[in-house]
Amino acid sequence: MRKEQQIPFVDHGSIFPFYSLNRNEIKWEDYLYILTPCQIKNGMWFKRDDMFAPLGYGGINGSKCRQAIWLIKEFDRLNKEKEKEKYILSGTSVHSPQLAMGSVIAMYYGYKSLHVLGSTKANTALKNDMVKIASWFKAEWDIINIGYNHNIQMRVQYLKDNYFKDSYFLHYGITLPLDNNTPEDIYNFYKNGAIQVQNISEDIENLIVPLGSANSAISILTGLFLYPKKNLKNVYLIGVGPSKIDFLFERLNIIKKYLKINCTNFIKHFGRKTMFDIIDKNSQNYNLYFYDLHSMKYVTYADKIIEHWDDIILHYTYEAKIMKFLKEKLPELLNEKSLFWIVGGQIHIDRMDYLKPILGEYPTKMNIWQEPK
C-alpha cells in the first residue's frame, strides 16, 4: 500500500434510516430503488453508491451490495416454502468484499453462509479483513489447495450439487448467470443499478465508471440509454482487473434485444482503435473510452493504494487506483463537468462494532466445514 498520511474517517451517512439485522424492523429490499446522492466535492461530482449501506457507512455497501441483496431476496421469495436449512455458497479471493457481503446478507435473510477459498491456510486467511468480517457473521469455510478461480468455482458447484441442493450459489463477481435465466431476468438484475443514473446533473459532460466484475458498469451504461443526459458526451470505463469488456457487451446486447433500446450505441475509443461499427447517430450515443489498468501494468488487482478526494477515502482496491490514474494521466477530467461514480467504499469491521452484543467479539479462528466421508 502506498505510504502517505491517512485522513480521518468521516461518516458520510447512508440512505437507510436506521441499521438493524432484524427483518421485522427493516426490509433492506425496500431501499433497492432509492437513489443514492450525487454530490459535488472540491470542484468535482461524485455518485455516492457507497452510501447504499444497510449497516451504516463503512459497513457492507455499494452497488454490488445492492445487487447481492436483490439476488438473495429473489431466492428467498421463490424458496419460502422449503423447510430445509439453506446456505449462501460462494467462492472468491481472501480480499474480495463478496465474502463480507454474502455472509452479512445471508444472516439477515436467515441463511447460513459457506465460502470456498483457494491456496491459503486458516490462520493466514483470517488476517484478511473480508475473511474476518465473514467469520464474525458466522461463515463456514472450505479451503482447497488450488488457488485458480476456475477451480474455486468448480468446487462451489460441486458442494451445491452434492451437499447443498436447496442452497443458493452466489456467483463470482455477484452476477446472474445466463443458464436458466431469461433476458427479462437479466434486465431485472441490472435495473436497480440502472435507475441510479436518474439524478445525474444535466450539466455533466464526462462520466467516469470503475470496471471490475463489470456488473455495476452494465447497470450504469443501461441507465444512460433509459435516462439519457443531454450534455453527457463521454463515458470513461477504467478497469482495475482482468478485462471484462467482452462480458459487458454480451450482457448489454441481451438487454438491448429485450428492451429494444440501442444501449450499445457508442463510438468506442479503446487504446489506439476507434470503432464506429455500431454507432447510430440518430439515437442517443456516447463516446466510450476504455482504459485497462491491469493490461497496461499500471497496477495489479492485488495492489492496495491509499487515495482520497476531499473527505472521501476511496476504496483501496478499486476507486483509489482510478483516482490515482486520473490525477496522473487524465487531470483534465478533474472538474465540475465530470462525475466519478463511486461503486462502493472500503468495508471496515469496526464500523459495525455496535453489533457485538449480537455477534460477540471478533473471531480468532475460522469455522472449517468438514465434508462428510
Image (cartoon, rainbow, N blue to C red):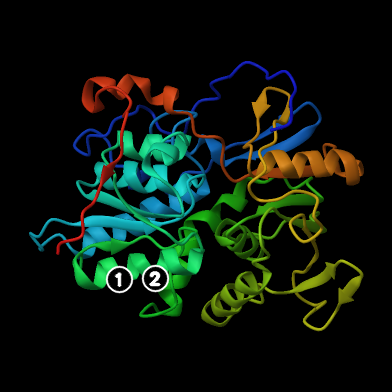
Point out which mark residue 36 bears. Answer: none
The amino acid pointed to by label 2 is Met
Q: Are marks 2 and 1 in contact (CB under 8 Å)?
A: yes
For residue 280, side relative to residue 199 (left or right): right
Q: How many residues crowd mark 1 within 10 Å: few (<14), some (14–19), many (20+)?
A: few
Work out how far the residue at label 2 is from the one at label 1, CA to CA, in angstroms. 6 Å
Q: Which residue occupies the foreground of this view, 82 or 193?
A: 82
For residue 45, side relative to residue 167 (left or right): right
Q: Which residue occupies the foreground of this view, 18 or 354?
A: 354
Q: Which residue is mark 1?
A: 158
Q: State the quadrant of the C terminus.
A: bottom left
For the point 37% across and 42% down, which residue is it? 122
What percent of the width, then of the height, locates residue 221? 65, 62
Q: State the quadrant of the N terminus.
A: top right
Q: Under tag 2, what secondary structure?
A: helix
For the point 62% across and 69% down, which residue is it? 248
Q: Is residue 189 visible?
A: yes
Q: Is residue 22 above or below residue 169?
A: above
Q: Under tag 1, what secondary structure?
A: helix
What percent of the width, then of the height, locates residue 281? 83, 76
> Extreme left residue here?
83
Point out which mark residue 154 bears. Answer: 2
Q: Is residue 123 above or below residue 262?
A: above
For the point 44% across and 23% down, which residue is it? 351
Q: How many residues crowd mark 2 within 10 Å: few (<14), some (14–19), many (20+)?
A: few
Task: Tell me the quarter of the picture where residue 250 sits.
Answer: bottom right
What percent of the width, then of the height, locates residue 150? 48, 69
For residue 44, side relative to residue 90 (left or right): right
Task: Tell me the quarter of the picture where residue 259 sits.
Answer: bottom right
The amino acid pointed to by label 1 is Tyr
Q: Which residue occupies the foreground of this view, 97 or 13?
A: 97
For the point 58% across and 37% down, which residue is it? 37
